[in-house]
Amino acid sequence: MSFSYDSADNNVSVGSNIELSGSITGSGNVVKIGATRRPQRLSLFINGNDNYVNIGSEPVFNALRIDIGNEKWRSSATGLTIGDNFSIASNSRFILPNSANIVEIGNNCMFSNNIIIRGGEYPHLIFDLTTNEYLDVSDGIFIGDRVWVGEGAYINKGVSVGNDCIVGARSVVTKRFTVNNAVIAGNPARVVKENVQWVANELLLNAYPDLAASFADTALNRINKTNR
C-alpha cells in the first residue's frame, strides 16, 4: 500500500501509526492526521486543488476510505475536519464529490461499520423544472461532539447532528437536527427519543458516578459480572 502525491505542491503531515494509501492529484491540498497508539489504515483519494483534510489525535480508522472528487471530476476548496478520539468500524466511506463541500465531525465520536457520508451528487446536476434553480447544493454536514452513529447509517448532504446524539442503525439522515442528547432514527430519520446519554462501555462508567450507580442495579450488570 502506498500514498502518492506531488510533495512540492501539496502539504501532507501524518502522525505515527497511520498507514495511509491512495493519492492526491492537484495542488494546494493540505492533509494533517494526528498520531495514534495502534496501527490504523486509511485510504485517501483527492482530485482537485486547495482541499483539506484535518483529523485529530488518536483516530481509529479500520480501513476508512475518503474520496474528495473522483477520477474524472475535480473537487476544489473542499474540507473535511474530524476531532480527537474519533473511531469508525470497517467498510465505511466518506464521499465529497462537489467543490466547496464541507464536513465537520466533533470530538469523541464513535461510528459503527458500513457508514456512508455523502456530501453531494456532482456531476449529476438537479434543477427546478419551473424556475431553473440549481437544487443540488450542499451547505455542509456538521456532526457534533460525542455522537454515536449506528451500523449502516447513511448521512446525506445538508445534515446536522447535535452533541451527544445517537444515530440509529440503518438510518437515513437527510436534514438538520439541532437538538442535543437525542436518538435520531428511521428512513428518513427523525427524533425518536430525547434526554439520553450514552457511554461507550462499562469500563468508562467511573467517570459518571450517577450512571454507574444506576447501572449497578440492572440485571445486565449482574449477568456481565457472572460471565467474567
Image (spheres, helix red, strand yellow):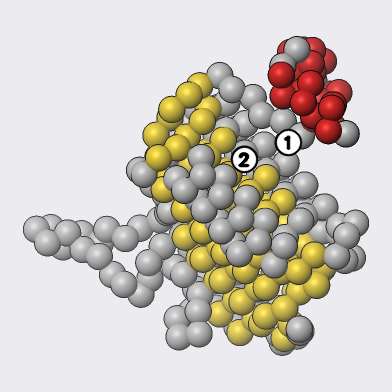
Q: Position of residue 169 (x, y in %)?
A: 51, 44
- Toward the viewer: 16 or 101? 16
Q: Which residue is mark 1?
A: 200
Q: Which residue is mark 2?
A: 148
| Quadrant showing the C terminus | top right
Q: Position of residue 186 (x, y in %)?
A: 40, 40
Could you tell me if the residues under marks 1 and 2 are in contact, i.e. CB atoms within 8 Å? yes
Task: Kindly identify the residue that appears in the image at 47 percent across and 48 percent down.
Answer: 170
Q: Is residue 22 visible?
A: yes
What label does residue 172 carry, if any?
none
Query: Is disc 1 placed on a helix, strand or loop?
Result: loop
Task: Kindly identify the residue that appears in the image at 57 percent across and 26 percent down.
Answer: 181
Report the number of discs.
Answer: 2
Q: Position of residue 188 (x, y in %)?
A: 35, 43
- Horizontal relation, residue 118 to residue 38: left or right: left
| Quadrant showing the N terminus | bottom right
Q: Amino acid at mark 2?
A: Trp
Task: Kindly identify the residue that appears in the image at 51 percent across and 40 percent down.
Answer: 168
Determine whether 20 is above or below 225 in the image.
Answer: below
The quadrant where residue 45 appears: bottom right
The quadrant where residue 211 appears: top right
Q: Residues within 10 Å of mark 2 (few under 14, many from 20)?
A: many
Q: Amino acid at mark 1?
A: Ala
Q: Is residue 159 visible?
A: no
Q: Position of residue 10 (x, y in %)?
A: 71, 78
Task: Kindly identify the residue that appears in the image at 77 percent across and 62 percent down.
Answer: 33
